[in-house]
């Protein structure tokens, strides 16, 4: 008994430090909590809602698109999470007229987030900050500490925030991702290198999740159709050195899932993947726009699709 008591006394300070760290990191501002709180307060005023992953987060600037637009996307946000957010806030979206969503060369093929070695920890954020109760709060998805590498990276900024009250979000007030700045010059060799790495990461190695992802996309499309909301599906611009190397079969599947939404649910689809109006510093990397490119793309979307 004495041994057990000594172990507990020894461990107690460590447990308290970890608990304090968990509390500090949870308190630190992040885009997930910000967007959840924004929607809780303003969902009934939204007329155009942007959902999706990084190809929406960094590509569509809400205040340049149209009145009462909000960007509810996040990095690596799968259709499953888009559907959760739409269903969660659906009853409050009383003025919604447009929903904008992306389809790209990866979205039909993505494995569930829990199975993604580089992104599984994002499940924690949807559980803690957006109320997605797919996982228990007592599971590893209920603690920032569960992903020690990201926890450690956020700990010191969280401590500074607790002292100074100052923090920088990764998105602006309407949810647009602000991390991808406009490069001062275009480095084609670096772009090609980064694109090759991204292409290998995005290359579809199996097709077992296509039906799973399609079902969530079709749920979103059906929800829009039943409520008279226009669903606008877009494929955002990509650098030619990237899209030239995407597998034909992968692109065919991407277009097929978008066209099914058009034919079955009346969605609008616009493919800007090979749009030659985007060059050089319009890109942050091979498949993402820079801030300059995002502003240009948003204006094009506003003018060519209209109705925002």
Image: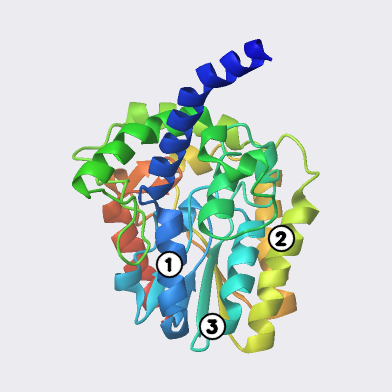
Please tell me whether mark 1 or mark 3 is closer to you in this view: 1
Q: Which residue is drawn at 58% across and 60% down?
A: 131
The residue lying at 22 percent from left, 50 percent from top is 165
Front position in the image: 199 or 217: 217
Q: Which percent across, then down, holds residue 34?
A: 39, 60
How far apart are the two marked residues, 2 and 1, measured between alpha carbons? 35 Å
Relative to 160, say whether 307 is above or below. below
Residue 2 lies, with reference to residue 66, above or below; the image says: above
How far apart, in angstroms, are the residues tagged by discs 1 and 3? 13 Å
Which residue matches tag 3? 92
The reply to whether discs 1 and 3 touch (Cβ–Cβ < 8 Å) is: no
Q: Determine which residue is flagged by label 2.
A: 256
**Secondary structure state at the residue bearing disc 1:** helix
Q: What element carries label 3?
A: helix
Residue 229: horizontal and vertical position, in percent?
Answer: 58, 84
Q: Residue beneath label 1, please?
A: 37
Q: Residues within 10 Å of mark 3 (few under 14, many from 20)?
A: some
**Residue found at the very far top of the displayed protein:** 3
Q: Do the residues labelled 2 and 1 touch (CB within 8 Å)?
A: no
| Residue positioned 46% across, 45% down in the render | 287
> What distance separates the C-alpha of mark 2 from that of mark 3?
32 Å
Asked whether residue 196 appears in the rendered view, the answer is no
Q: What is the total number of numbered labels drawn onto the structure image?
A: 3
Q: Residues within 10 Å of mark 1 (few under 14, many from 20)?
A: some
In the rendering, at what x and y percent does residue 36 appear? 47, 64
- The outermost residue toward the front is 2
């Amino acid at each position: 008994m004495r041994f057990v008591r000594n172990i507990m006394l020894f461990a107690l300070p460590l447990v308290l430090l970890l608990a304090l760290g968990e509390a500090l990191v949870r308190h630190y501002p992040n885009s997930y909590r910000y967007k959840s709180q924004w929607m809780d307060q303003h969902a009934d005023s939204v007329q155009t809602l942007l959902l999706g992953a990084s190809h929406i987060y960094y590509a569509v600037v809400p205040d340049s698109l149209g009145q009462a637009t909000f960007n509810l996307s996040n990095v690596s946000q799968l259709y499953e999470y888009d559907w959760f957010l739409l269903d969660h806030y659906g009853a409050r979206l009383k003025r919604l007229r447009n929903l904008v969503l992306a389809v790209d060369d990866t979205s039909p093929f993505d494995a569930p987030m829990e199975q993604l070695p580089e992104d599984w920890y994002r499940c924690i954020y949807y559980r803690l900050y957006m109320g997605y109760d797919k996982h228990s709060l007592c599971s590893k998805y209920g603690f920032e500490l569960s992903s020690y590498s990201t926890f450690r990276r956020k700990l010191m900024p969280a401590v500074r925030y607790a002292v100074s009250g100052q923090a920088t979000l990764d998105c602006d007030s309407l949810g647009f991702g602000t991390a991808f700045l406009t490069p001062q010059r275009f480095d084609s060799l670096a772009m090609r290198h980064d694109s090759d790495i991204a292409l290998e990461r995005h290359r579809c190695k199996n097709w077992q999740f296509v039906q799973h992802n399609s079902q969530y996309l079709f749920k979103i499309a059906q929800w829009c159709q039943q409520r008279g909301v226009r669903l606008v599906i877009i494929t955002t611009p990509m650098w030619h050195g990237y899209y030239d190397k995407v597998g034909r079969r992968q692109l065919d599947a991407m277009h097929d899932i978008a066209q099914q939404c058009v034919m079955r649910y009346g969605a609008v689809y616009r493919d800007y993947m090979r749009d030659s109006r985007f060059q050089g510093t319009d890109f942050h990397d091979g498949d993402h726009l820079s801030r300059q490119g995002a502003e240009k793309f948003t204006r094009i979307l506003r003018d060519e699709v209209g109705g925002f």
